[in-house]
Amino acid sequence: MSNLKITGINFDIHWKDKDQNFRSLDKMTDKISADIIVLPEMFSTGFYMNAEEIADRNEETLKWMQQLATRKQTAVCGSASVADHGKFVNRFYFVSPDGTYQKYDKRHLFSYSDEDKTYAAGQERVIVHYKGWRILLQVCYDLRFPVFSRNNDDYEVVLYVANWPAARIDAWNTLLKARAIENQSYVFGLNRIGTDGNGLVYPESSYCYFANGDLVSETEEYFVHAVLDREKLQIFRNRFKFLDDRDQFKIF
């Protein structure tokens, strides 16, 4: 498959209300036609640090995502607070149209808001293979750590899902473009919008960048659309072989 169509939902998350979020998203996704639907970080509850109160214990969010993926016959991805064997994780699910899924647990926990005191850090770097594309999964604060996302010629796309507030939005915008340029890949960053239960404001700030830093996404009301062109990416990489000069190292 040469092209991949991704649609992200700019979503004002209902604070700690899974059922309402699921209902709202069911309506919002009715008219979407895409290969991948992307949802924000902790889209079913909002970015809330009392995991004991909000965490999925019966895969509530995953089951809803599976229903949506099979109904729409598209991949669906986003993160949720999840209880897992006596610990809590900020888990990014990538659900395929047949309901099968892969998961990535957020590696870099936002210590500024004490996320590291509640959630356990992931120990695995996860690349999903979907429709012939290799896709690296990342969550919010991961964006600040370029070593973890370094392209070892093992992916073409990075997906970032986030709750990144207005006070630090310049960093979000700058680093998304930087990750695309330094890794010669597409970077699709989906942030939430609105105001959360802590009073933090989230501006419209979801984008997709090409490997040279060009913006390739379009925003339409609550949706961010991007069509990723494999041939265009390959031509660019063949012409500018910067990845061949990368430092060699291993994280895990």
Image (spheres, rainbow, N blue to C red):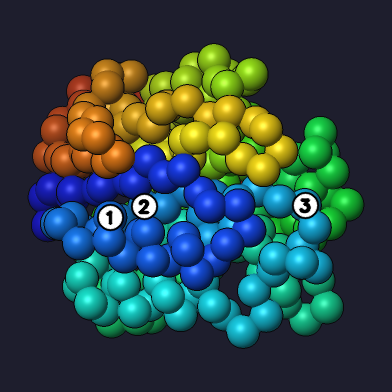
Which secondary structure, mark 2? strand
Alpha carbons under labels 3 and 2: distance apart: 22 Å
Q: Nearest the camera: 161 or 236?
A: 161
Which residue is rendered at x = 36% and y = 59% of the image? 25
Alpha carbons under labels 1 and 3: distance apart: 27 Å
Q: Say which amino acid is labelled 3.
A: Met
Q: Is residue 99 left or right of residue 143?
A: left
Q: Say which amino acid is labelled 1.
A: Met
Q: Position of residue 29 (x, y in %)?
A: 25, 59
Q: Is residue 174 left or right of residue 146?
A: left
Image quarter in which the C terminus is found: bottom right
Q: Position of residue 199 (x, y in %)?
A: 67, 33
Which secondary structure, mark 1? helix
Q: Is residue 231 above or below residue 207?
A: below
How crowded pointer 3 is (Cα within 10 Å; few <14, some 14-19, many 20+) is rated as some
Which residue is rendered at x = 26% and y = 79% of the image? 70
Question: What is the number of the mark on residue 49?
Answer: 3
Please tell me whether mark 2 or mark 1 is closer to you in this view. 1
Question: What is the number of the mark on residue 28?
Answer: 1
Residue marked by disc 2 = 38
How crowded pointer 1 is (Cα within 10 Å; few <14, some 14-19, many 20+) is rated as some
Q: Position of residue 3 (x, y in %)?
A: 13, 48
Which secondary structure, mark 3? loop
Q: Quadrant of residue 200?
A: top right
Which residue is rendered at x = 49% and y = 75% of the image? 62
Q: Is residue 147 above or below residue 37?
A: above
Q: Quadrant of residue 144?
A: top right
Q: Say which amino acid is labelled 2.
A: Val
Q: Earlier in the sequence, mark 3 or mark 2?
A: 2
